[in-house]
Amino acid sequence: MPAVVVEPHDRKHLFKVTEVCSEMPARDLALLGILFGSPMKVTEIAQLKVRHVLSPDGGYLKESQVPAEIAFNGLARPWYWSSKLLCGLLDSYFRERVKRNQGLTANPSAFRQMDPDSSVFLNRRGESFHLTARKDKVGQVRYTCSSLSRHYSSLFASAGIEGATAESGRRTFAVTLRRQGYDIPHIHALLGNQNLKTTRRMLDSDPVDMGKIAASAF
């Protein structure tokens, strides 16, 4: 079964509930922002470093990439920190992170005082979300980040969004772009899937809003 697509009205509700109910609202809003505002998987979000997002002068890397060392398939793919909404959420979180004295560097003039090699997202103790390695059926090592996956599930549950998981962010990202008219090859490049069929399956199973279709008739 494909991951659930979180529709715009549910996303809006999710952000409102998180802002009010979260113990670390700035961080959790940024976590939701990157989940829906990028095609990154949970393991990639957990491994994302400050230097993957910011330049030494503290600005966003407009033309960047998901580097091979953190990419889910070991292949680098392009990414762009160009969304004003996502960057605004990250700005708020970075300010809060500095106030909490989490993962800072001795050089206060670089990377907004944050250690460039520290993970972007930290838990309440100021630690990275840890990955767990396991072997699949054919003996290949796969990585998971259960703690961050569970955290995303708890945010969805608090907002009453049934069936949504961290994988919903990646699929929602792809479906949203397709609904806006962007072509499949460009969406595919951002997702980083090796097989175009995988991307097409994510998009072809887009749930149809029958009410929206009916309303457009008159």
Image: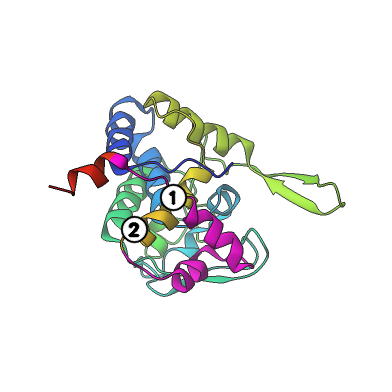
Q: Nearer the viewer, residue 215 or 54?
A: 215
Instruction: Please report the residue visible at 34 percent of the width from the left and 58 percent of the height from the top.
Output: 179
Compared across the picture, whether 218 is left or right of 153 comes to left
Residue 185 higher or lower than 15, as above or below: below
- Name the residue beneath numbered marker 1: 206
Q: Position of residue 10 (x, y in %)?
A: 32, 36
Q: Which residues are magenta?
A: 181-210
Is 33 a magenta residue?
A: no
Residue 75 x/y as whole percent:
64, 69
Residue drawn at 30 percent across, 29 percent down: 17
Query: Image height check: is 89 above or below 66?
Result: above
* Mark 1–mark 2 distance (CA, rounded to whole Å): 9 Å
- Residue 179: give its label: 2
Residue 210, x across and y down, in percent: 31, 41
17 lies above or below 140: above
Which of the two labelled residues, at mark 1 and mark 2, occupies the earlier sequence position? 2
Q: Quadrant of residue 192?
A: bottom right
Say if the magenta span includes residue 209. yes
Of residues 154 and 67, the one nearer the viewer is 154
Q: Amino acid at mark 2?
A: Arg
Specify the quadrant of the image occupied by residue 69: bottom right
- Image point 44% across, 62% down: which residue? 107
Q: Are the two marked residues, 1 and 2, in contact with CB atoms closer than 8 angstroms?
A: yes
* Image location of residue 195, percent across then percent down: 63, 67
Image label count: 2
